[in-house]
């Protein structure tokens, strides 16, 4: 990820230094600014305390270990999630590719450094899945996840999400994700993702898959994943 | 062309249904033509399983399904596994590989399931469609290795008995017949294949295949050489 230095405008520029008369005056400022800029590198720009405070704020809704939570809406598990996926989704909320007023506000105030710090924290959590899907659907869900339904043109989820559903880079971990959250996303895919035509994103890959799964197949896959460690 | 063939088949089949209802009225008279129609219908069905019919819609739906993983123009995609580029690929190679997945010559549970439900007509249609796609390569190989890779690809490594890749895959790496196109292939995919050749190909001893040709070559290349070739191929249009 490209980090944007919030202090980039404070760096000393060539202009003032060229005007010989005020060199000394500016040398002081320049030195001060360089020190400032140097300490504002990737890990210094966001303090440990600020990250912990923000993490506690996320955990209010996403659960104390990021395991997800059934609030009024199903609030997704973030624990063990791929950092690139989390970063992409936060950007998607800001750019209204994923219209979600709550998350859009949340994401809007996060600096790139904070996003990186939070994504890393969540990736390192590993709580037990909440579970909650009907157990009798797990076998069917596992088959769909691992093999797909070739005769119905449903691709195997495992091809991109991995056989353990841990995801890879921009492809999300699904293991342990909340049963109702998975159902909500898969049954609403083309209304919830990729909603900003000016900024197309990779969510279009999932559109035909979500579209070709029947509701009972969605339930089965969600049940399988909701229990998967 | 496919639609044309289909139309010629519906004729005798419909006719058969009509004549079967008439059979009750005048059995003796109609029986010979019933037999004729059954023979006709059987032949048509056999053709169905062969190369005859697959609807345009069915092919388009299946293409979309393939492209979920292989990328919207089949340029390849980095999922959990590197999923290979199929765009511009040789149709014979695609068909051979689909068969290899079914025969477990290439052990890949996902692709075995995928291939298993494809009729020969569908395989031909898909292979032709992929062959005609021509998106830009995804790239991604290490840029500073491209020149070394090009040299190995075009000249081989004589002192370790590695022949030039170009002698079979062509100077532009477009492949020919059962030799696959390599131009624009995902570098991670090329690396994974070449470093695992004898564990991934020709795995069914009862059905030996041409993958044996590549075995000593893959074996003779060092990992840095493989990385270089993969880098070169990843940018090749």
Image (cartoon, rainbow, N blue to C red):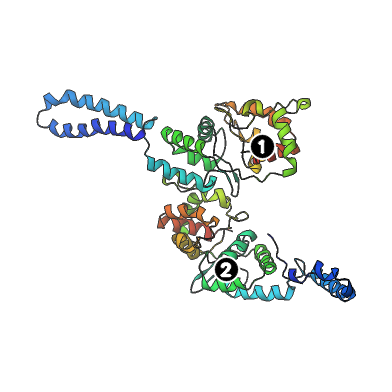
Is label 2 in a helix, a strand or a loop?
Answer: helix
Q: Please provide percent x and percent y for residue B202.
A: 59, 30
Q: Nearer the viewer, mark 2 or mark 1?
A: 2
In the rendering, which numbered label is found on residue B132?
none
Label 2: chain letter: A
Name the residue tied to disc 1: B196
Q: Name the residue under label 2.
A: A94
| Residue at (62% x, 36% y) in the render | B183
Image quadrant in which the N terminus of chain B is located: top left
- Picture quadrant of residue B29: top left
Left-right relation of B160 to B166 = right
Q: Give the image location of residue B197, x and y in percent.
A: 65, 34
Q: In this view, does A47 lie to the left or right of B67?
A: right
Separation of residues labelled 2 and 1 (CA atoms): 43 Å
Q: Position of residue B163 (x, y in %)?
A: 70, 26
Q: Is residue B225 visible?
A: no
Query: Which one is nearer the viewer's eye here, A155 or B62?
Result: B62
């Amino acid at each position: 990820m490209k980090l944007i230095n919030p202090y980039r405008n404070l760096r000393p520029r060539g202009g003032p230094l060229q005007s010989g008369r005020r060199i000394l005056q500016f040398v002081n400022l320049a030195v001060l600014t360089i020190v400032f800029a140097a300490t504002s590198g990737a890990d210094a720009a966001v303090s440990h305390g600020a990250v912990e405070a923000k993490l506690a704020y996320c955990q209010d809704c996403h659960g104390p270990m990021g395991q997800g939570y059934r609030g009024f809406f199903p609030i997704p598990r973030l624990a063990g999630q791929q950092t690139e996926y989390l970063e992409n989704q936060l950007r998607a909320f800001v750019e209204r590719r994923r219209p979600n007023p709550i998350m859009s506000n949340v994401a809007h105030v996060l600096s790139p450094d904070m996003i990186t710090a939070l994504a890393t924290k969540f990736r390192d959590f590993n709580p037990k899945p909440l579970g909650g899907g009907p157990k009798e659907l797990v076998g069917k869900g596992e088959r769909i996840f691992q093999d797909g339904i070739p005769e119905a043109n449903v691709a195997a989820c495992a091809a991109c999400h991995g056989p353990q559903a841990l995801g890879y880079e921009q492809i999300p971990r699904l293991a342990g994700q909340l049963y109702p959250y998975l159902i909500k996303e898969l049954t609403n895919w083309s209304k919830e993702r990729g909603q900003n035509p000016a900024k197309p994103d990779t969510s279009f890959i999932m559109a035909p898959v979500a579209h070709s799964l029947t509701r009972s197949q969605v339930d089965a896959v969600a049940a399988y994943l909701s229990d998967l460690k | 062309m496919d639609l044309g063939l289909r139309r010629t088949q519906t004729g005798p089949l419909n006719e058969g249904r009509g004549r079967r209802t008439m059979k009750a009225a005048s059995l003796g008279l109609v029986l010979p033509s019933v037999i004729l129609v059954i023979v006709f219908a059987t032949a048509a069905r056999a053709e169905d399983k062969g190369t005859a019919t697959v609807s345009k819609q069915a092919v388009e739906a299946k293409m979309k399904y393939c492209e979920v993983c292989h990328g919207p123009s089949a340029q390849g995609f980095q999922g959990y596994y590197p999923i290979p580029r199929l765009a511009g690929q040789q149709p014979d190679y695609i068909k051979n590989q689909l068969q290899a997945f079914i025969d477990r010559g290439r052990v890949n549970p996902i692709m075995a399931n995928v291939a298993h439900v494809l009729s020969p007509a569908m395989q031909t249609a898909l292979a032709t469609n992929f062959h005609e796609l021509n998106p830009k390569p995804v790239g991604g190989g290490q840029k500073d290795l491209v020149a070394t890779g090009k040299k190995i690809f075009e000249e081989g490594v004589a002192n370790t008995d590695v022949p030039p890749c170009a002698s079979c895959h062509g100077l532009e790496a477009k492949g020919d017949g059962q030799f696959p196109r390599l131009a624009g292939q995902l570098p991670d995919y090329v690396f994974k294949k070449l470093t695992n050749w004898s564990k991934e190909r020709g795995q069914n001893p009862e059905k030996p295949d041409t993958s044996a040709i590549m075995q000593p070559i893959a074996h003779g290349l060092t990992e840095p050489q493989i990385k270089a070739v993969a880098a070169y191929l990843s940018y090749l249009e």
